[in-house]
Image (spheres, grey):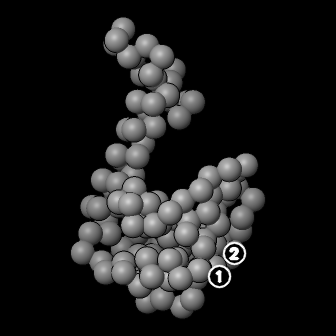
Amino acid sequence: IEVLRGKLEFESGEEGREQAVLEHLLRRATADTASRVLGGLDVGPLVTAVENGSAVTTGERVSAKDVLAALPELPVVDKIAKRLGAESEGERAAALELALEALYLAKRIDKVSQEGETVYG
């Protein structure tokens, strides 16, 4: 978001709210993208797994392997990866994180972010 601040021009009435506006735009873009690429998938099993204690931690210092290992074997994770063309472990973890963020934005799962890590569940 910091990179975008210098690239956008805000109206005078938005002074002091630049960060909030950019955060809103990022959330909206994430939700719209996830809806477009993942629409129609039954993500219920993913929601159930996260709600039943399979919390997923993501962050700069969390490996893709750890992100993927946080969940039990779920066919929906493979379907998410396929929709996004994700093949490598890193790509699959990123695809899963997009789905989790979309579920959070849709208020279907919880999320806590602190100290460079985000925990879904």
90 to 3, vertically: above or below: below
Q: Which residue is mark 1?
A: 69
Q: CA distance from mark 2 to mark 1?
A: 5 Å
Q: Confirm whether residue 74 shows in the render.
A: yes
Image location (x, y in percent) of residue 5:
50, 24
Q: Residues within 10 Å of mark 1 (few under 14, many from 20)?
A: few
Q: Secondary structure at mark 2?
A: helix
Q: Residues within 10 Å of mark 2 (few under 14, many from 20)?
A: some
Image location (x, y in percent) of residue 16:
48, 16
Q: Residue sitting at 38 percent across and 16 percent down?
A: 14
Name the foreground residue: 84 vs 105.
Answer: 105
Badge 1 amino acid: Ala
Name the foreground residue: 80 vs 120.
Answer: 120
Name the residue at the top extreme: 12
Q: Are marks 2 and 1 in contact (CB under 8 Å)?
A: yes
Q: Which residue is mark 2?
A: 66
Q: Confirm whether residue 94 shows in the render.
A: no
